[in-house]
Amino acid sequence: MNFTKISLIIFLLTSISLSGCKKNQYNLTGNIFGTIYYINFSSSNRIDIGRIKENINFLLANIDNVASNYKDNSEIAFLNNSNDQSFVTISSNLYNLIKKSLYVGNLTNGYFDITLDDIKKSRGFYFNKENTYPKNINRNFTYKNIVLGNNSSIKKTSPNIKIDLSGIAKGYAVDLIYNYLMSKNIKDFTINIGGEIKVNSNEDEILIAIDDLSKNQPYLEQVLIKNHAIASSGTYLDTINYKGAEISHIIDPKTLKNISNLNILVSVIHKECAIADALATGLIAMSKNDIIRFSNQNNIASMLVIKDGNNMKKYYSSSFKKFLKD
């Protein structure tokens, strides 16, 4: 999975505060999904840091092999290329990724839709400008035409369904690492994969800054989170020139048109990073006038930022405001 341009724009402002008993602090970094991951944690127990990093890299490589849009031999590529319309067994990670995606699809009234892979590729995303991906397939389907069965099985009711998990896979990977660290009795940590962040702290809240999309100031906003995740989606990231116009990778599933306003950012805070990741993608596909209203109606902690010339207009849902630093 390559997210070089899609990498979200949150960065860690402060590290975990160490208080009480003396703890050792560890920092891990590496490359995955075309971006960089940072993990820092503290523990009073003895840690085999080499084994911890080895296991984390294994988890990340597994998700890349499951959900990558760039690998011809990824699990999602095999599923997308299959014309089988009966139930087939898939890995537990792919099953869980799709299950969470369908949940957010329903929660956002269809604005998060993982069946837009053919639209993206037909317009040049994931491929070079001279791609020959089919452009005129029969699109009589949405995410609702994906059926999950028991025992990690799935059925596509149309052979033309091509699934794109780029809007949730990084957040899901963050959650997997969270679960792994917790299983090792590591309780104070911050995970950051290309801007998808999740923290766990038994002590102080962690200060996270959301980067300024105009680059005119160090950050747009600061939030304090504890045992939560934050993810963002921006229309100005991962854009291409299509038929003479610059378009965003974000697609409105209702119209199948790419968002043309390249000055929008949505950040979401949630307990699960996968859900925050998917919600940010689903919300930003909506009309900008509906994002905060919809968030308030559904108790979603979201922030909308719109760049208007040199001005930054910020709007917050009621749930998001409680995380603001000031």
Image (cartoon, rainbow, N blue to C red):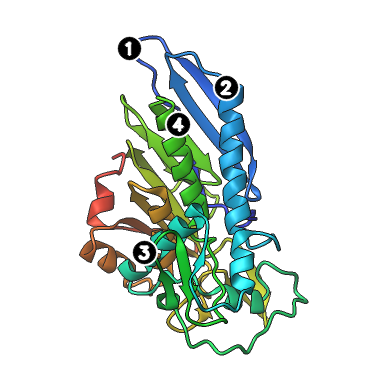
Could you say where residue 17 lies in the image, as x and y percent from the top left? 39, 22
Could you say where residue 18 lies in the image, as x and y percent from the top left? 39, 18
Element under disc 3: helix
Q: Image quarter for residue 71?
A: bottom right
Which residue type carries mark 4? Leu
Task: Report which residue position mark 2 lands on.
Answer: 49
Q: Which of 235 and 117 is in front in this view?
A: 117
Q: In this view, does 168 lie above or below 51?
A: below
Task: Report which residue position mark 4 lands on.
Answer: 181
Q: Is residue 144 above or below residue 171?
A: below
- In space, the residues marked 2 and 4 are separated at their CA atoms by 12 Å
Q: In this view, does 101 lie to the left or right of 299?
A: right
Task: Report which residue position mark 3 lands on.
Answer: 104
- Please report contact status of discs 4 and 1: CB closer than 8 Å, yes or no: no
Element under disc 2: helix
- Please report contact status of discs 2 and 4: CB closer than 8 Å, yes or no: no
Task: Report which residue position mark 1 lands on.
Answer: 20
Q: Can residue 307 be seen in the rendering of this structure?
A: no
Residue visible at 35% across and 29% down in the picture:
201
- In primary-sequence order, the first of circles 2 and 3 is 2
- Please report contact status of discs 1 and 2: CB closer than 8 Å, yes or no: no
